[in-house]
Amino acid sequence: MDLLERFARILTRVPRRAQHAYSGATVPASHRLPAQNVESSLVQIRAATLFIALLGGACASHSGAAASGGIVTLVPSFADDVYALGAGPQLVAVSAFTDDPRAAALPRVADSSSVDVEEIVALRPNLVIGIPSQARLIEPLRRAHLRVVLLSDDGYDRIFTNLQTIGALAGRRGEASALVARLARETAKLHARTYRFAWHPRVFIVLDSAPVWTAGSASYISKLITIAGGRNAAADLGAPYASYSSEALVEDRPDVLIADRAAHLDAALDREPWRSLRAVRLHRVYSVDSDLLERPGPRYNDAIRWLLHRLSPIAIRPNGPPRRL
């Protein structure tokens, strides 16, 4: 390890802590960034900027020997995008919850609350892709003159614009256009299965149960519910993801509860407000892995298919001609 890398390791390490995160948007704001640790690190980095700049010339001969190039993704959905575009060989590092088997041997350099700056700098990637809630965490990477692109993942439409953007950055424009068209066709076929629905169940998403954290109408999860023939019971929520009052939840009277497994809702169903809900009394409570429902990437049709499987038995029109929504 040369002097510059040793110095960067001392300055930029941000302690990790386990976080449930697949989309930065779905994580409560209080969980996204460990502000005290991040600010402390950034203050140290600002104070040492001149020193690092002076060391840069002295260490140049050593740095030239390091491997360079490639893409680093800081959230799992962007790694999914890269693989779906056929650009997997360009990946040199991924985030902690990336679960594609092809990434098994790659370094894990980020989670919802930290970025391993020194390891990324050592890799010298051509491109680092993250989300806006990681802006402060990646500031040291910009200072190291790495190319960092932050792409919002809050909305359904962002799935496709992000694929197009990453495709362009990875030299896969044609593949991106073809993939977006294929995904759209598959979505249309899935949505056609809702034409026989007699009604549209009100679905409440439980991302966390204490306090209640859910997906509003601006979220990509809400769009998936609509495509699958349901209605978001928290559609009045202005933010894509936010806390929700127990009183409002009881007033909404959802027909179905869908809970992230990490929320451990099953342990709270015998308490208020949950036990007063119609969905609980009718045993319409389903647990889902967060990597299926909360990851706004090219696997989103799998989430629609999962939702259809749960909503169809209670919403299907048993007789009569198909009806468009």
Image (spheres, rainbow, N blue to C red):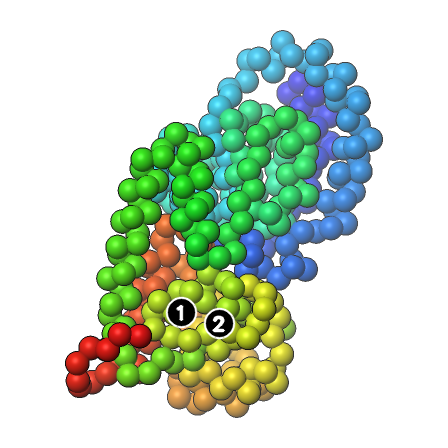
Is residue 88 visible to the viewer in this orientation of the structure?
Answer: no
Classify 292 as above or below 193. Answer: above
Residue drawn 33% across the image and 83% down it: 199
Q: Label 1 near label 2: C-beta < 8 Å?
A: yes
Viewer-side residue, 216 vs 57: 216
Q: Is residue 224 left or right of residue 57?
A: left
Quarter holding residue 44: top right
Left or right, 87 with respect to 198, comes to right
Label annotation for residue 225: 1
140 or 220, nearer to the observer: 220
How far apart in space, not on screen, are marks 2 and 1 (Cα)? 10 Å
Residue at point 55%, 75% (across, down): 236
Task: Identify which amino acid the numbered label 2 is placed on.
Answer: Ile
Q: Position of residue 254 (x, y in %)?
A: 46, 83
Q: Tell me which amino acid carries mark 1.
A: Ile
Q: Nearer the viewer, mark 2 or mark 1?
A: 1
Q: Residue furthest top?
A: 61
